[in-house]
Image (tube, grey):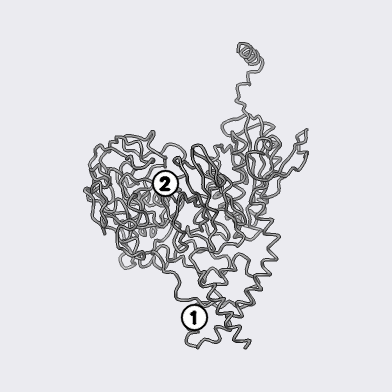
């Protein structure tokens, strides 16, 4: 011990710069191959796509793998990881993701990353890393083929028995400005297999499919010709694809084309709810490269009547809640433990979940992302947490009032309505009080039924439990270990998912309990997810 | 005679492809969804990282409507059959990975559990034909 201290102090006298922190790290360097070519093709579009990939894929994945993003350049990034295994996994996740994102695009629009991973001793500063290790990582990235991950032998030794994927030794490679050759390995993840398979099989597949399609189409033609003319007219909307076009259909779209080529029976499945209805996709998917992501806009006009232009924003009906203390959580589920006392300050909360009418006012103001379809007084669904945040931000701005999402503690306090029982009406479940699975006799096609259809709780709030899931402000934590006791939202930690409350018409009675909690990815929409607003005094 | 045969054939083909009609997007026939880890029959102590493998399709963010790509769902101890005409349910036994995750930290109580992966399309519907993994059984010590 004494010796070590001597060495250190001796050295530090000679070189005062030793203070800069050095450490061993797995360095991941990635860049987009052919970036300037892509920029030439479509400057703004490429820029937006790259930024989106950085935001949606790279940054969250780095977090998930316990790494740190050191810097991004126009077309690339450098990240460091404590663990080589996590670093390579991160690389695989990125490459697999890109395969999915590129799948629907023509080849010259593909964004493909080249990734190099190296283990090295580096100097870390706030916004950059330095050292041989970094240079080698970026050289590896430079020699990697698009869509590939190249790793150095240092990384390979660490991951070879821990990561179940193939490694191809590429031998010693001389890299620019590094004197010693570097032994390089190529990671064979699934994405590589995907491409190879595709290339090899594409021709055979297309040939076989066009053969079968021709057979089916000619069969269908016979079938149609033999129908009486009256019937034919009825079927006019189901297009009979001309056989000439069929061989051009890319392999993957073939099954859809097959359906479209044949007269469709009237027994097509009944749409489940208004949101899901526009997804029925028998005919349109036959046309190549269709993107039906946004719902049909025709209902926009009916939702925001042009007859009476809204000058002031209609505010949601709010119910004031007096402050107080309560025991939050329960012993019914691991996520609801430990029970703990929370004090709530006075606030107001929406009497009902936010409705489609309210949502579409935000859309009309161009502050919310998509037009919701369905009855005006039904709760809005298929919103992500980020969508809900956009809505409350718009509402707060338009009304100049402190509208926001409720905190999880506020939600539970309001849902309990002053009770400490399992349900707000007691400890025993009773059918017909809440809108949950097998709790009512509402037809599936009617769901989600309009707000205010069920009995209010003691605070006068409707559908606090059942109906639609409701986003709250809090980040998801798997239990209440370390939760705040002052009713504020719990935002600590990484926040890839947020809390949803209430349960929906598709969840059973357990989810109706006011203490029941679940989580969902922050930026993902789901057909049963809605929200209600809160207001600070 | 030949014409009659053709009619019968085409009618048969029509009925076949119509019964297969479902909400979900079409999936390639050789798509393979599997568990990289854990393996069927594994005994695991405490929490674990569950890793999802997918061949011949890509993983993408839910809501992104790209050909031949979807996002993972992990079904824990689910016994009900999969309904192809409904979005994959969302509850504590149907875990969604709509951000394009290919692995997840899973904590299960001790005992026997079944795991199964289901790939969902942009709107959370199963593909057609469904892209599902084998249902594996693991034991948590």
For the N terminus of chain B, the quadrant is bottom right
Q: Residue at x 57, y 72 (%)?
A: A258
Q: Residue at x 45, y 37 (%)?
A: A493
> Could you say whether the residue bearing mark 2 is in a helix, strand or loop?
strand
Instruction: Read off the residue under disc 2.
Output: A519
Mark with earlier residue (2, 1): 1
Chain of the residue under label 2? A
Q: Is residue A473 left or right of residue A117?
A: left
In the rendered image, residue A322, in percent from the top left (x then y), is placed at 22, 42
Q: A533 or B25: nearer the eye? A: B25
Q: In this rendering, does residue A414 appear at all?
A: no
In the rendered image, residue A259, in percent from the top left (x then y), is placed at 54, 72
- Answer with the quarter of the image where residue A23 lies: top right
Q: A54 or A324: nearer the eye? A: A324
Q: A345 or A391: nearer the eye? A: A345
How packed mark 2 is, by other alpha carbons closer than 10 Å (few <14, some 14-19, many 20 or more), is many
In the rendered image, residue B18, in percent from the top left (x then y), is placed at 51, 73
- Tell me how far mark 2 sits from mark 1, CA to CA: 45 Å
- In this picture, is A401 found above or below A109? above
How packed mark 1 is, by other alpha carbons closer than 10 Å (few <14, some 14-19, many 20 or more), is some
Q: Is residue A499 left or right of residue A203?
A: left
Q: Residue at x 67, y 46 (%)?
A: A114
> Could you say whether the residue bearing mark 1 is in a helix, strand or loop?
helix
Q: Which mark is residue A235?
A: 1
Q: In this rendering, does residue A529 appear at all?
A: yes
Q: Is residue B67 left or right of residue A114?
A: left
Whether callout 2 and callout 1 share a subunit is answered yes
């Amino acid at each position: 011990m004494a010796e070590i201290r001597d060495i250190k102090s001796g050295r530090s006298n000679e070189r005062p710069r030793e203070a800069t922190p050095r450490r061993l790290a797995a360095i991941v360097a990635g860049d987009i191959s052919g970036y300037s070519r892509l920029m030439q093709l479509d400057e703004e579009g490429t820029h937006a796509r790259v930024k989106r990939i950085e935001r949606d894929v790279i940054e969250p994945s780095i977090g998930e793998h316990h790494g740190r993003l050191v810097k991004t350049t126009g077309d690339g990034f450098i990240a460091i990881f404590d663990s080589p295994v996590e670093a390579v996994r991160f690389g695989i996740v990125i490459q697999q993701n890109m395969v999915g994102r590129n799948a629907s695009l023509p080849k010259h629009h593909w964004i493909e990353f080249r990734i190099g991973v190296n283990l090295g001793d580096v100097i870390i500063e706030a916004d950059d890393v330095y050292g041989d290790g970094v240079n080698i990582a970026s050289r590896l990235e430079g020699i990697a083929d698009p869509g590939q991950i190249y790793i150095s032998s240092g990384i390979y030794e660490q991951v070879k028995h821990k990561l179940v994927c193939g490694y191809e030794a590429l031998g010693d490679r001389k890299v620019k400005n590094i004197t010693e050759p570097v032994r390089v390995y190529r990671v064979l993840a699934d994405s590589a297999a995907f491409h190879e398979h595709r290339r090899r099989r594409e021709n055979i597949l297309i040939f076989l499919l066009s053969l079968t399609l021709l057979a089916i189409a000619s069969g269908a033609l016979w079938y149609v010709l033999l129908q009486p003319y009256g019937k034919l007219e009825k079927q006019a909307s189901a297009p009979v694809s001309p056989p000439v076009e069929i061989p051009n259909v890319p392999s993957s779209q073939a099954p859809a084309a097959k359906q479209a080529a044949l007269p469709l029976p009237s027994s097509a499945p009944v749409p489940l709810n208004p949101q899901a209805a526009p997804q029925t996709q028998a005919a349109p998917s036959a046309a190549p490269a269709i993107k039906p992501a946004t719902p049909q806009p025709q209902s926009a006009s009916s939702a925001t009547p042009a007859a009476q232009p809204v000058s002031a924003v209609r505010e949601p009906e709010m119910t004031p809640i007096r402050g107080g203390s309560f025991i939050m959580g329960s012993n019914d589920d691991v996520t609801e433990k430990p029970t703990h006392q929370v004090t709530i300050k006075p606030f107001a909360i929406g009497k009902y979940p936010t409705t489609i009418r309210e949502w579409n006012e935000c859309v009309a103001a161009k502050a919310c992302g998509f037009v919701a379809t369905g009855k005006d007084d039904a709760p809005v669904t298929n919103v992500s947490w980020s969508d809900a945040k956009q809505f409350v931000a718009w509402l707060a701005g338009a009304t100049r009032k402190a509208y926001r999402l409720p905190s999880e503690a506020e939600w539970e306090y309001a849902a309990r309505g002053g009770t400490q029982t399992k349900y707000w009406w007691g400890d025993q479940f009773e059918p017909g009080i809440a809108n949950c699975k097998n709790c009512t006799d509402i037809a599936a096609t009617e769901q989600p039924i309009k707000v205010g259809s069920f009995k209010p709780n003691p605070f006068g709030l409707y559908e606090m439990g059942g109906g639609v899931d409701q986003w709250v402000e809090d980040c998801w934590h798997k239990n209440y270990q370390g939760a705040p006791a002052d009713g504020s939202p719990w935002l600590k930690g990484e926040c890839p998912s947020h809390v949803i409350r209430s349960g929906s018409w598709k969840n059973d009675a357990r989810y109706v309990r006011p203490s029941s909690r679940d989580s969902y990815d922050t930026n993902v929409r789901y057909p049963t997810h809605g929200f209600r607003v809160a207001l600070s005094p | 005679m030949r014409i009659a045969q053709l009619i019968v054939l085409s009618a048969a083909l029509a009925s076949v492809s119509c019964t297969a009609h479902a909400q979900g997007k079409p999936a390639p026939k050789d798509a393979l969804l599997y568990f990289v880890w854990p393996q069927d029959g594994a005994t695991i102590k405490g929490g674990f990282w569950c890793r999802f493998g997918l061949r011949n399709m890509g993983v993408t963010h839910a809501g992104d409507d790209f050909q031949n790509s979807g996002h993972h769902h992990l079904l824990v101890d689910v016994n009900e059959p999969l309904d192809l005409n409904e979005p994959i349910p969302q509850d504590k036994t149907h875990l969604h990975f709509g951000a394009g995750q290919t692995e997840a930290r899973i904590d299960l109580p001790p005992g026997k559990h079944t795991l199964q992966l289901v790939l969902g399309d942009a709107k959370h519907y199963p593909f057609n034909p469904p892209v599902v993994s084998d249902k594996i059984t693991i034991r948590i010590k």
